[in-house]
Amino acid sequence: MHITIFGTGYVGLVTGACLAQSGNHVVCVDIDEDKIARLTRGEIPIYEPGLEQIVHDNVRSGRLRFTTDAAEAVAHGTLQFIAVGTPPDEDGSADLQYVLKVASTIGAHMDDYRLVITKSTVPVGTADKVREALGQAVRERGVDIEFDVASNPEFLKEGAAVEDFMKPDRVVVGVDSDRAAEHLRALYAPFNRQHDRTIIMDIRSAELTKYAANIVLATKISLMNELSQVADRVDADIEQVRKAIGADHRIGYHFIYPGCGFGGSCFPKDVRALAQTAGKLGYDTEIINAVERVNDRQKQVLFEKLAAHFGDLSGKTIALWGLAFKPNTDDMREAPSCTLMQALWEAGARVRAYDPEAMKETRRIYGERDDLLLCETAEQAVEDADALVLVTEWHIFRTPDFADIARRMRQPVLVDGRNIYKPSYVAQAGFTYYGIGRSAAS
Ligand code: NAD
């Protein structure tokens, strides 16, 4: 099939590369000239395991191309995917300007039937707006060309995006015509070989499904984080509690890890956006609002533990291990590390930090500053530090030589923001240990 993808971010680039990998001819288009120039040179602008190889393979085979020329891109694909950003507006609603701009662009250039599929996460009812923008752009040209719109929300996880796209738990497709359903069924057939993972439904239900999935996951995290706060106050160990409740099949072990709050480009914005959608319709989403409030509070927990230990943090040097919002990505959007660094700087502390992939992104966001030293290694980050904070649980941080780390530090204080260390083990190396909800841990 001939496919066009608007937007070459995490979702668009992975979608384009993976669809080319299954034999389609794909053109990826972006308005960011620098990004397209880099992709054309074979540079992958984001870190995503496995992505570089399939982009290179498919560019070489001629099935994947990059362009900034929207007219050429619209001419290429019968299927046109919209995978541009939907950042939060001032009030938390999803900003649809990029999505609707793409719809108008497609309408302005198409001269044959097109199926326009929204992959971006968009509020319920957006497909109607896409249809309207497209139809208007077509009519303004005084022509009459058929098109369909569809919703195909994306569920990939950054850090495992290629794997998730290639082996999806399910593919959700929202359509209102048999023609659109057939196109999408055919497109996703190679991903359904074991069993049919494609769930076809009406467009509004598909749009809501994406928010519902993210909100259920975010709720699990906030609920566990809230329980960890209680555990801290009643001298219990949330990790023992987690293991015991996860054994109940109705609860399960997935997504019940307490930590220092969720970040990323999806959960925080999708939680806010659905609350806004409901609020505008006169419904107050009490649980969803609380998920966000609990998360905002939890993002302060690392700083609070440091402040409780040191009292005054001014002049202290704090080492951070991990800056990305989760392992295996360089994405820093709404990362707990950002909240922590900001609070430390306001308190007059200095930060030494190391992350395996997010150093460039951190430099891009914060530039050069006296109170931030980006280090080459995890060991270098702890030199003369008053405390070490594990913020992102990358594998390489899992079994450090704690005796060596303690020797390098000014004071052996460890705040474990993801509960990955055994408190009694790090205590043996002389550390004062603080976990999340583990005041009774040993
Ligand atoms: P991103 O910010 O990484 O990339 C968006 C890209 O769209 C940018 O490169 C931008 O230049 C480009 N763009 C903007 N306007 C354009 C236009 N008119 N024509 C062509 N390109 C244009 O965004 P992302 O993380 O890939 O997310 C995209 C959408 O997918 C969002 O709605 C997001 O909520 C959703 N989503 C993201 C993830 C994720 O893990 N990142 C997962 C599932 C869904």
Image (cartoon, rainbow, N blue to C red):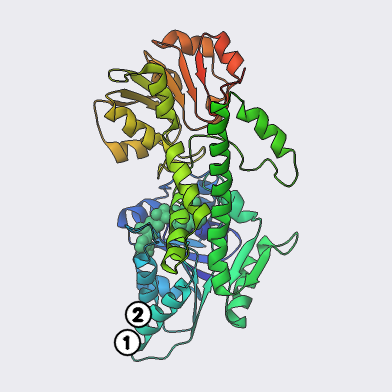
Badge 2 crowding class, 10 Å Cα cut-off, few under 14, some 14 to 19, many 20 or more, is: many
- Regarding mark 1 in the picture, which secondary structure is present there? helix
Residue at horizontal 35 percent and vertical 70 percent from the top: 101
Residue at horizontal 43 percent and vertical 48 percent from the top: 44
11 vs 349, nearest the viewer: 349
As displayed, is residue 162 above or below residue 138? above
Query: Residue 367 at x, y = what percent?
Result: 26, 36
Residue 377 seen by the camera: no
106 vs 435, nearest the viewer: 435
Left or right position of 277 against 25: left
Q: Which residue is mark 1?
A: 140
Q: Are marks 2 and 1 in contact (CB under 8 Å)?
A: yes
Q: Earlier in the sequence, mark 2 or mark 1?
A: 2
Left or right position of 24 against 389: right
Residue 188's tag is none
Q: Determine which quarter of the picture holds residue 155.
A: bottom right
Q: Determine which quarter of the picture holds residue 75.
A: bottom left
Query: Residue 439 at x, y = what percent?
Result: 56, 22
Residue at horizontal 38 percent and vertical 32 percent from the top: 340
As displayed, is residue 149 above or below residue 17? below
Left or right position of 2 against 367: right
- Regarding mark 2 in the picture, which secondary structure is present there? helix
Q: Does the closest atom of ligand 1 sit within 8 Å of the Cβ of label 1?
A: no
Q: Determine which quarter of the picture holds residue 255.
A: top right
Screen quadrant of the C terminus: top right
Alpha carbon distance from label 2 to label 1: 8 Å
425 vs 221, nearest the viewer: 221
Residue at horizontal 47 percent and vertical 56 percent from the top: 270
Q: Which residue is mark 2?
A: 108
Image-quarter location of ligand 1: bottom left
In this rendering, the label closer to the viewer, 2 or 1: 1
